[in-house]
Image: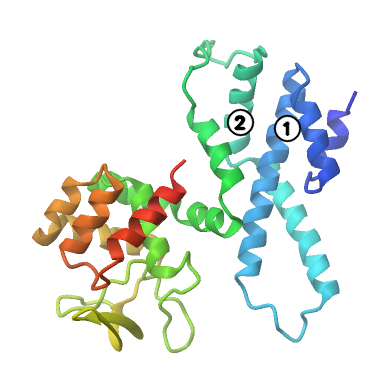
């Protein structure tokens, strides 16, 4: 029998550790399922940190194979520590695994009874499936912006995944953000330009515009924000307050309808914008 104590102090990032987690998941005990859930949460956090490292410059004077090895070890330890405090994912997975395997879990302090296991896939099941399919950089991008997207969704009625998809299209999953002259990000995730009504900071950047169907490079002024949350709020305000986007809000439940309405409203000049946006949204749907 595999010791839960041993596994709880070891981050399961290799084949042997993953196999051990699979065997533990088959044990009909709450302790085993808790350990599996915690290790999966730690693995997820490590994947996010690894993706963030890969997105950062790696050619500095102190960069070497040895330094990268120590950095990787540090990331694993940080991930394990973060998972031990919990971000909520482990609890959701534990509850789902317990229901699937019929394991009794302790009653909560209020004495509430856990609901019966649903027959349809639950949110935690969909999260697990999405994590197993999406590349690490996609997971990191979505995890970083999820809270801001949900806030904007509540104010517009547009699903958060639609807005995350548009931010991914505009920035190349965060790899092509609009930068100021000093290299700092503008936090502009939606390519919103600084028109005459904009009173905030401005960043000049080169962009591709289509004139009569022909792509042309132009330098335009874009809005700059203090945070990604501010970018989502401004984007939500633009859709809610500008009459030209009224039909976009009405199409908020259908990916293709949402993307097509955006293009018809003149959000972008790219003739293939709606097709590209629809494809990204559908690729990331759980």
- Of 265 and 271, which appears nearest the observer? 271
Residue that numbered label 2 is attached to: 93
Do tag 2 and tag 1 residues touch (Cβ < 8 Å)?
yes
The residue most toward the left is 243
Helix, strand or loop under label 2: helix
Q: Position of residue 59 (x, y in %)?
A: 70, 83
Is 155 above or below relative to 179? above
Task: Identify the residue at horizontal 64%, vertical 24% (top origin).
Answer: 97
Q: Earlier in the sequence, mark 2 or mark 1?
A: 1
Residue that numbered label 1 is attached to: 36
Task: Identify the residue at horizontal 62%, vertical 56% (top origin).
Answer: 48
Question: Can residue 7 be seen?
Answer: yes
Task: Identify the residue at horizontal 66%, vertical 16% (top origin).
Answer: 101
Helix, strand or loop under label 1: helix
Tell me the CA gap for discs 2 and 1.
9 Å
Mark number for residue 214?
Answer: none
The answer to whether residue 139 is left or right of residue 84 is: left
- Of 53 and 281, which appears nearest the observer? 281
Task: Identify the residue at horizontal 60%, vertical 17% (top origin).
Answer: 99
The answer to whether residue 157 is left or right of residue 32 is: left
Q: Where is residue 73 in the image (x, y as percent from the top left)?
A: 80, 59
For residue 78, which quarter of the picture? bottom right
Q: In which quarter of the image is the N terminus?
A: top right
């Amino acid at each position: 029998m595999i010791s839960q104590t041993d596994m709880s102090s070891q981050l399961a990032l290799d084949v042997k550790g993953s196999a051990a987690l699979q065997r533990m998941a088959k044990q009909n005990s709450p302790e085993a399922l808790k350990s599996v859930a915690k290790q999966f949460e730690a693995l997820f956090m490590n994947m996010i940190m690894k993706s963030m490292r890969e997105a950062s410059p790696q050619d500095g004077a102190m960069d070497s194979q040895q330094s990268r090895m120590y950095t990787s070890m540090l990331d694993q330890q940080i991930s394990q520590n973060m998972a031990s405090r919990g971000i909520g994912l482990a609890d959701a997975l534990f509850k789902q695994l317990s229901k699937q395997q019929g394991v009794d879990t302790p009653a909560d302090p209020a004495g509430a009874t856990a609901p019966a296991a649903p027959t349809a896939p639950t949110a935690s099941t969909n999260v697990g499936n999405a994590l197993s399919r999406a590349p690490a950089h996609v997971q990191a991008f979505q995890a970083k912006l999820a809270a801001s997207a949900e806030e904007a969704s509540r104010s517009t009625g547009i699903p958060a995944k639609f807005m995350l998809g548009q931010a991914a299209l505009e920035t190349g999953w965060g790899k092509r953000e609009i930068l100021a002259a000093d290299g700092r990000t503008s936090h502009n995730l939606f390519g919103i330009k600084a028109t005459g009504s904009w009173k905030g900071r401005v960043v000049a950047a080169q962009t591709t515009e289509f004139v009569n169907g022909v792509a042309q490079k132009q330098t335009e002024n874009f809005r700059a924000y203090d945070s990604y949350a501010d970018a989502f709020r401004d984007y939500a305000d633009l859709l809610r307050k500008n009459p030209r986007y009224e039909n976009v809000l009405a199409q908020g439940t259908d990916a293709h309808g949402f993307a097509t309405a955006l293009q018809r409203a003149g959000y972008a000049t790219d003739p293939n914008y709606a097709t590209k946006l629809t494809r990204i949204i559908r690729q990331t749907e759980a």
